[in-house]
Image: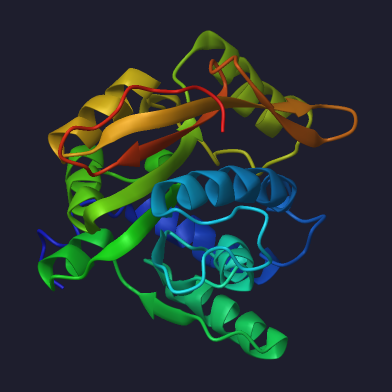
Amino acid sequence: MTAAQASSIDPAEIERFERLASSWWNPEGPFWPLHRLNALRLDFIRCRLADQFGRDPAAPRPLTGLDLLDIGCGGGLLSEALAGLGALVHGVDAAERNIEIARRHALAQGLDIAYQTGTAEALAAHGQSYHAVMNLEVIEHVADLPAFMQACCKLVRPGGCMLVSTINRTSVAYFGAILCAEYLLHWLPQGTHQWRKFRKPEEIASLLADGGLQVSARTGVGMLPIARRPFLTSFMGMNYMLAAEKTSGGSSPDGFC
């Protein structure tokens, strides 16, 4: 891997995720928010991909035959869910321990998922491409966001799309995602998030546009604190998801899925 290909890696982030890797599949462990988010974001993904590729979202396996990249796949929570919908999933993560955990769990579930230790830059340099790229809860952990997003955009085939999920850079997000989640409620280990790495939706939309993708759908994501249950909302001041298409003309954001 060349220096350019690895430019978006933050070694401190990789070290932290390596330490937590054994907890990926514990629904009450440090990754419990991702377990709770998985079903919600999967519905958003299913709807957007069905719309993009002319599939029936109500079908049992609506993503059959689609090549999907789950970049920053962690222990494989989303990868396994996508494989269950029929997708051909390539799960890639820079933390080797994450990939070990993901492979072991997929094998135990009888799922055929291609897992690999690597980066978006390395995949792009080797000419890889996919119908869709899943870029979820990764943006706030990379060292060089423009380089990372440029690589991710290259990985989307013409006519394909990218799904992005991250945290907004607002005072509400600082209070909720850092002060409350890490220090008051102890939902997440302290240091999980850095304020300077949060990005506003318009900043991500600009980076997507630079890579030839136009935002076609967007939604906010909230969390009921007592029930610890996530929900979709029009308010995007905390967490949010974007869908973007790589098409000749693009389309205007159409709101909820």
- 191 up-or-down from 92: above or below: above
Which quadrant of the structure image shows residue 210? top left
Tell whether 215 sits left or right of 233.
Answer: left
Of 242 and 34, the residue lying toward us: 242
Residue 145 coordinates in the image, percent (x, y): 25, 40
Residue 182 coordinates in the image, percent (x, y): 67, 33
Residue at the image point whose x is 47% and y is 27% from the top: 218
Quadrant that contains the C terminus: top right
- 186 up-or-down from 202: above or below: below
Residue at the image point whose x is 45% and y is 53% from the top: 54
Residue 173 coordinates in the image, percent (x, y): 56, 19
Of 169 and 38, the residue lying toward us: 38
Residue 17 coordinates in the image, percent (x, y): 52, 59
Tell whether 131 sits left or right of 212.
Answer: right
Which quadrant of the structure image shows residue 229? top right
The answer to whether residue 200 is visible is no
- 62 up-or-down from 86: above or below: above
Tell whether 130 sits left or right of 242.
Answer: left
Residue at the image point whose x is 55% and y is 41% from the top: 192
Which quadrant of the structure image shows residue 22? bottom right
